[in-house]
Image: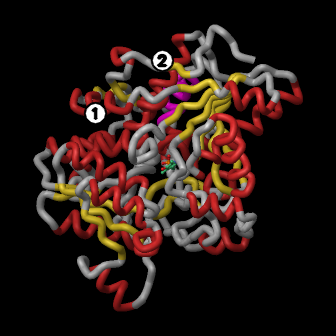
Amino acid sequence: MKDQTIPYKIYLNEDEMPKTWYNLRADMKNKPAPLLNPGTGKPLTAEELSPIFCEELVRQELDETTPFIEIPTEIRDFYKMYRPSPLVRAYCLEEKLGTPAKIYYKFEGNNTSGSHKLNSAIAQAYYAKKQGLKGVTTETGAGQWGTALSMACSYFDLDCKVYMVKVSYEQKPFRREVMRTYGASVVPSPSETTEIGKKILAEHPGTTGSLGCAISEAVEVATKNPGYRYVLGSVLNQVLLHQSVIGLETKTALDKYGIRPDIIIGCAGGGSNLGGLIAPFMGEKLRGEADYRIIAVEPASCPSFTRGTFAYDFCDTGMICPLAKMYTLGSSFIPSANHAGGLRFHGMSTILSQLYHDGYMEAVSVEQTSVFEAAEQFARTEGILPAPESSHAIRAAIDEALKCKETGEEKTIVFGLTGTGYFDLVAYQKYNDGEMDDVIPTDEDIAASIARLPKVPV
Ligand SMILES: *Cc1c(COP(=O)(O)O)cnc(C)c1O
């Protein structure tokens, strides 16, 4: 039933938008374990990181003590073009479910790139520009991150080179063309433009590429070309920091109406949207000021939290990136080819991994057909066509709301709706045609890739 005191959408005025990001690590007693140099097994220093990443981003990556970091005016101005994002009361979904629960979602799909990734892309592009760089390189799979980064680079007039996994480049031309429209150069990976690409092509002619290979190419180009750095759209501490804008806005909006969430839910790929959404709430929890149930939702076909191991592992399948201590399925783990719903990364943010390990949050895994069922129900009631990734959070929110229906509890549920699904219609087609199924890795599959974890001196 519509509560007359709470609007469908809670917006913020420009002057209520966050002026600082919140660095959750400052309030963690057990800090996330440092990134290690895979060659020496020692924590990576700023000197070692700065040939790869921009200086200010290296500082943010390593800063575990400063709680609030100012958002530069230029970034706040860009945020104003598409933020604040609305916090929506899902009245129609509540009614359809017949639940006494109150459901809210923070919608991050209201920009051309269609997801929350723009929040960090614009920050990373800004620091590259401020350092006087010519451009940045990155990899992209399906293309959400590449699209966000190309928008950000065009705003600051930076060159943007995107290595796009070849199979996506060929089969998913739409995001590729959005990137090119924003001025990015998009190279199908593996390519002849890098040493590693040439090597891979010589060894595996006709390969359709992988994210690990695209990362290797993007890092090589960044380190070999003066004036270029590499940027990454998830997993890293700096990315969670930038994404805290989601949680800070959510908290301000809820506080305006005196709403206290009981349960906060987000999908988890590398952990950036979830880490951003929960940041201020988790901060209160860590400081003992409030308590919330916080739930990470992951695909049953790539269950890093629920079936992974908390250990040092490579962040990439190419095994060239630093080692991170995280919940991982092993960097050689590849989710089943028929998994359509994104969130394919084998590991997880080190911040979220530590918090999960210390019992501050829960995790559930959900099967893709039930995720698309939830997506369909959401689209038909709330009107928004959700991204498959976001629909993992919808699934868990609906499940919690249905539990409230059984118990009669009027819990308040907040979830992150990270993006729209317009570029995922091949997956929707499969679902609509009844051709989608659930493939869940066996214990043996997971044990095989866990057995290949790097040996790290304790
Ligand atoms: C990239 C992406 C995700 C997953 O990434 P996280 O870093 O875990 O947030 C979720 N939803 C959408 C729409 C995405 O584009």
Q: Chief secondary structure of the magenta span?
A: helix
Query: From the viewer's perspective, is residue 229 above or below residue 287?
Result: below
Kindly report which numbered mark, 2 or 1, lies closer to the viewer in this rendering: 1
Q: Which amino acid does label 1 sit on?
A: Phe
Judge whether residue 55 can be spotted in this image. no
Left or right of 48, for residue 303: right
- According to the picture, the residue beneath numbered tag 2 turns out to be 252
Judge whether residue 252 can be spotted in this image. yes
In magenta, the rendered stretch is 276-286
Q: Position of residue 318 (x, y in %)?
A: 42, 72
Query: From the viewer's perspective, is residue 193 above or below residue 105?
Result: below
Q: How is the image coloured?
A: secondary structure
Q: Disc 2 to disc 1, how far (Cα)?
A: 20 Å
- According to the picture, the residue beneath numbered tag 1 turns out to be 78
Q: Position of residue 350 (x, y in %)?
A: 49, 48
Q: Residue at x 52, y 34 (%)?
A: 107
Camera-side residue: 325 or 174? Answer: 174
The quadrant holding residue 407 is: top right
Q: Which of marks 2 and 1 is nearer the N terminus?
A: 1
Residue 285 colored in magenta in the image: yes
Helix, strand or loop under label 1: helix
Q: Position of residue 77 (x, y in %)?
A: 26, 28
Q: Which amino acid does label 2 sit on?
A: Thr
How many neighbours does mark 2 have within 10 angstroms: few (below 14), some (14-19), or many (20 or more)?
A: some
Q: Which residue is drawn at 40% across and 90% down?
A: 205
Q: How many labels does the image show?
A: 2
Q: Residue at x 30, y 70 (%)?
A: 187
How many neighbours does mark 1 have within 10 angstroms: few (below 14), some (14-19), or many (20 or more)?
A: some
Residue 119 colored in magenta in the image: no
Q: Where's the N terminus, which quadrant?
A: top right
